[in-house]
């Protein structure tokens, strides 16, 4: 057996060729369907009921991490300090860093704190994949899959989304995902 490393598009094309070969055999198609259904886990996240007291806080923190800020939360007072991750990582900052230093100093006075960081690029990529996989428009879905397989997938995805009727749907999907992510951290830290 010849071992061949194939790209995602080549693999998909080869799978489609195989499916085409058995397209008239209902039993084999059923077998393939059942195999794939068992293989692929259902990735729907379970519903998290966020108490009303925390809803605005979770929403705001989700928005902050989406723009690259690290959020420090005082679990006793629910006070939040937001610092640009770029600044914490030692990146260039065009402005007065003393403002951020005094904000960060506040957190050292807290008895404890919860830190919520922006998603890593792999996690952000996963959100784009999930959104794409759940689209009801097969043509646009295919375009997004192609964009995600190219170099600079974030830029290609953004360009397609920004010029589509799915722009607002994307923003809502991403916000909901980020809110579940933040709520999960709150649950882990027994805030609710």
Image (spheres, grey):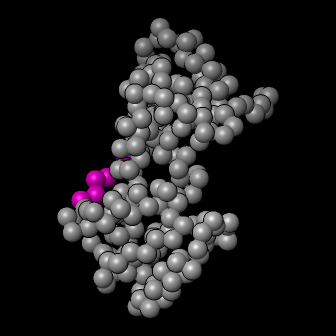
Q: Quadrant of residue 80?
A: bottom left
**Residue 80 visible in this rendered orientation of the protein:** yes
Q: Quadrant of residue 148?
A: top right
Q: In the orientation shown, which residue stands out farthest toward the top?
A: 24
Horizontal and vertical percent for residue 86?
A: 61, 65
**Residue 38 visible in this rendered orientation of the protein:** no
Is 152 left or right of 104, judged from the image as shown? right
Q: Which residues are magenta?
A: 44-49
Q: In the orientation shown, which residue stands out farthest toward the left?
A: 52
Nearer to the camera, 23 or 184 = 184
Split into 4 quadrants, where in the image is the C terminus?
bottom left
Horizontal and vertical percent for residue 171?
A: 40, 43
Horizontal and vertical percent for residue 15?
A: 59, 23
Q: Is residue 48 magenta?
A: yes
- What residue is rendered at 47% in x and 56% in y? 66
Q: Is residue 46 magenta?
A: yes
Nearer to the camera, 119 or 184 = 119
Q: Quadrant of residue 91?
A: bottom right
Is 55 left or right of 8, judged from the image as shown? left
- What residue is rendered at 35% in x and 44% in y? 172
Split into 4 quadrants, where in the image is the N terminus?
top right
In this view, 182 is above or below 15: below
Q: Main secondary structure of the magenta part?
A: loop
In this view, 159 is above or below 172: above
Horizontal and vertical percent for residue 181?
A: 40, 59
């Amino acid at each position: 057996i010849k071992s061949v490393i194939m790209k995602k598009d080549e693999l998909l094309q080869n799978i489609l060729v195989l499916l085409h070969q058995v397209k008239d055999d209902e039993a084999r198609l059923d077998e393939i369907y059942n195999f794939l259904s068992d293989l692929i886990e259902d990735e729907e996240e379970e519903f998290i009921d966020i108490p009303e007291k925390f809803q605005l806080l979770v929403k705001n923190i989700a928005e902050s991490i989406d723009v690259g800020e690290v959020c420090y939360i005082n679990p006793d007072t629910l006070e939040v300090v937001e610092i640009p991750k770029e600044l914490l990582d030692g990146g260039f900052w065009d402005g007065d860093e003393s403002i951020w230093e005094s904000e960060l100093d506040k957190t050292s006075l807290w008895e404890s704190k919860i830190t919520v960081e922006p998603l890593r690029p792999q996690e952000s990529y996963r959100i784009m994949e999930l959104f794409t996989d759940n689209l009801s428009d097969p043509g646009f879905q295919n375009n997004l899959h192609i964009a995600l397989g190219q170099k600079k997938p974030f830029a290609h995805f953004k360009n397609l989304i920004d010029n589509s009727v799915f722009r607002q749907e994307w923003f809502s999907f991403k916000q909901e995902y980020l809110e579940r992510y933040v709520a999960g951290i709150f649950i882990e830290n027994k805030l609710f």
